[in-house]
Amino acid sequence: MGNDGTNATPRLYEALGSSFDIGAAVSPRTLLQSGEFIARHYNSLTAENEMKFVNLQPVEDHYTFEDADRIVAFAKTHGKKLRGHTLVWHNQTSDWLFKESDGRPVCREKLLDRLQSHIKTVVGRYKDAIYAWDVVNEVIADEGPELLRPSKWLDIAGPDFIAKAFEFAHAADPAAQLFYNDYNESNPHKRDKIYRLVKSLLEQGAPVHGVGLQAHWNVYSPSLDEIREAIEKYAMLGLRLQLTELDVSLFRHEDERTDLTSPPEELLELQAKRYEAIFLLLKEYQVHIDAVTFWGADDNYTWLSNFPVRGRKNWPLLFDEQHQPKEAFWRVIGKPTQL
Ligand code: GLA
């Protein structure tokens, strides 16, 4: 058997493919190291970082497409779908965007012009390769009564930078499916705010086609009821849904333990049960859900190793560090464990 779990192991996307596309976040590095394994198990890809603003336009009018192009080429060669991530965000966005050359803040018109030009260039370039974009990422405030989180976007352009971004993206590629994407999406307070925002965008006529539930979850939360209620609420908007960044951390958010060097059996069992329950739930709502993308391909590389606790390894995905299917994999595809 190859080191990518070949032969005996069914392909993940084929085992689940009648329900939804199965994606992974990738980088040129993970494609180089594990391209064969990724191509075997996933039929959709998202660039983990390479299509973010700062990666694509670090300096005004100086675009750096090399890494993003590598991912696009890989998707093309292997016949994979590709999601674009992400056009407007408060993180990983170049400072120059918000400033004049002398350091003063730009005016609203200039910021929106720059955004339009970025979107036109990027979305236009990948028109044939990318079928869906996360247009706006994480603009909702997690806590408190405010709808929107404070940001330079909001300070300078006011709240309608959100609708504008969708309009610009739609003009650049009228065929692309356009998503609003956020985390803590199953928390009732935040869920209701995301719903309110997207509803008001639709009422203004903004071209929003989907809600991305990031789904950075852990073995304890959110509860299945909360996930169910979130899916039902977003589906009421009449939009397509996708899980865009799924992972199931072995630790509660506030847990700061750093003692583990390998995942304990009991936590892997908890994770397997949790993944099984999550996918059973997702299948119940498959008429609304088009794709489930994992935020990584295997436990060898995951953003959760080091975050939010420095120096701590995490094991949040369906394949282990050697690309072998974990117990969670077998439960997700509804097959008995293979020994
Ligand atoms: C958010 C972003 C992603 C990524 C993760 C952490 O969820 O949408 O692009 O940065 O944080 O990896």
Image: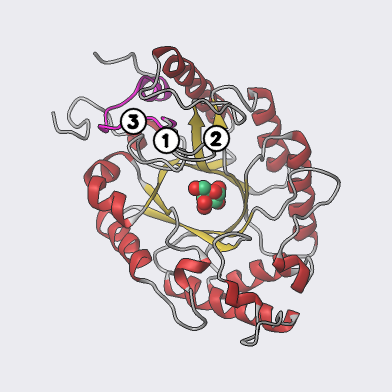
Callout 1, which amino acid? Ser
Percent position (x, y) of residue 98?
65, 75
Element under disc 1: loop
Quarter of the figure with the C terminus: top left
Is 17 left, or right, of 236 in this rendering? left
Tell me the CA gap for discs 3 and 2. Answer: 23 Å
Q: Is residue 336 magenta?
A: no
Disc marking residue 18: 1
Disc marking residue 65: none
- The quarter holding residue 101 reads bottom right
Q: Mark 2 = which residue? A: 286
- The quarter holding residue 233 reads top right
N-terminal label among 3 and 2:
2
Disc marking residue 319: 3
Callout 2, which amino acid? Gln
Percent position (x, y) of residue 128?
40, 68
Q: What residue is drawn where x is 64% and y is 28%?
A: 222
> Disc 1, disc 3: CB below 8 Å?
no
Give the residues drawn in magenta, as a range: 315-333
Callout 3, which amino acid? Phe
Tell me the CA gap for discs 2 and 1. Answer: 9 Å
Is 116 left, or right, of 234 in this rendering? left
Q: Main secondary structure of the magenta part?
A: loop
Res. 141 in view: yes
Report crowding for label 2: few under 14, some 14 to 19, many 20 or more residues within 10 A (C-alpha).
Answer: some
Coloring scheme of the render?
A: secondary structure
Element under disc 2: loop
